[in-house]
Amino acid sequence: MPSPKTTRAMGSNSTSSATTNNGKFEFSSLVNSRTPLSDSPSARLRASESPVRRKDSLSSQQVLPEEDCMKLNPSFLGIAFRSLLAIDLWLSKKLGVCAGEHCSWGSARPLMKLIEISGHGIPWIAGTLYCFYKSDSLAVQEVVLNLLFALILDLILVGLVKGAVKRRRPTHNRMDMFATFSVDKYSFPSGHATRAAMVTHFLLNHLVLAIPVRVLLMLWAVIVGFSRVMLGRHNITDVAFGFLMGYMQYNLVEYLWLSPSTVPALFNL
Ligand SMILES: CC(C)=CCC/C(C)=C/COP(=O)(O)O
């Protein structure tokens, strides 16, 4: 692939031309792939095209395919976004202190894995089903059924976003998670973070809890989020978006609230 420094292709004649500097081709700007080589003052260089081959092989009317081009003038937002991602990866790797037994906090890994199980979907769904089975009043059944609905909705929405974004987990992650599903190989967003945020919001709003219990519940959610990064399962942005998504999922459950008047069949179990 030619050197990224490029010399303006002087398209005055039917084919582009390149200048050489001690035999090394230099380009100051590139020809736009969407217009004929001879017309545009700035452009892109076909990544697989060497200057020498390009001069001979491309006529002035041939348009370079977009996918073959390398964009050398990214927007400010593009640069800012990539810088944020680079900081995210770097800081997440720094915070992955329990990613393995050999890490600086490797001895805390068993505790982090216990916290991981406390935020897993299976224990929450199994526990909620048990509470629904044992519930003896319509009011309790209504709350428990909506919690079950929220947990299932969380799995579906997180699975869809994971499958769409397909962000790989951090390289330092050791994939030894308890009971995972296909899309759980992907990192964005953190399903534990969405679940912790959603469940905490749900319980704080639908259960009468003493202040210390409310504080412990919120603390649990934050610790689950931190544990995802410390275990190396996620980057910080995966968890941050997970918390935001979990909060939005709770509001969606409130909007779609299942009540005996709207879905009586669910309550005649
Ligand atoms: C298979 C079931 C019922 C739940 C999967 C729960 C799970 C493994 C989610 C992944 O969480 P992270 O995205 O935080 O790693």
Image (cartoon, rainbow, N blue to C red):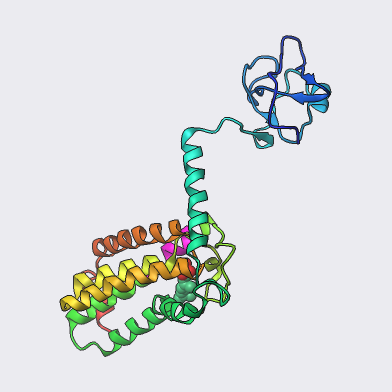
Q: In the depicted view, which residue is nearer to us: 37 or 234? A: 234
Q: Is residue 263 left or right of residue 183?
A: left
Label count reads 0
- Residue 146 seen in the figure: no
Q: In the depicted view, which residue is nearer to us: 211 or 183? A: 211
Q: Quadrant of residue 112?
A: bottom left
Position of residue 82 relative to residue 4, above or below, is below
Say whether residue 46 is magenta: no
Q: Is residue 12 left or right of residue 148?
A: right
Across and down, in percent, residue 14 comes to 76, 12
Across and down, in percent, residue 23 comes to 83, 24
Q: Quadrant of the N terminus?
A: top right
Across and down, in percent, residue 224 comes to 38, 71
Report the residue at 41% width, 75% height from top. Answer: 121
Query: What is the span of residues highlighted in magenta in the rendered image?
Result: 152-161
- Residue 102 seen in the figure: yes
Position of residue 212 relative to residue 39, above or below, is below
Across and down, in percent, residue 232 comes to 51, 67
Q: Is residue 214 left or right of residue 103?
A: left
Q: Is residue 140 left or right of residue 149?
A: left
Q: Quadrant of residue 61?
A: top right
Say whether residue 153 is magenta: yes
The extreme front residue here reads: 104
Report the residue at 22% width, 69% height from top. Answer: 262
Q: Quadrant of the C terminus?
A: bottom left
Position of residue 204 relative to residue 131, above or below, is above
Report the residue at 82% width, 25% height from top. Answer: 52
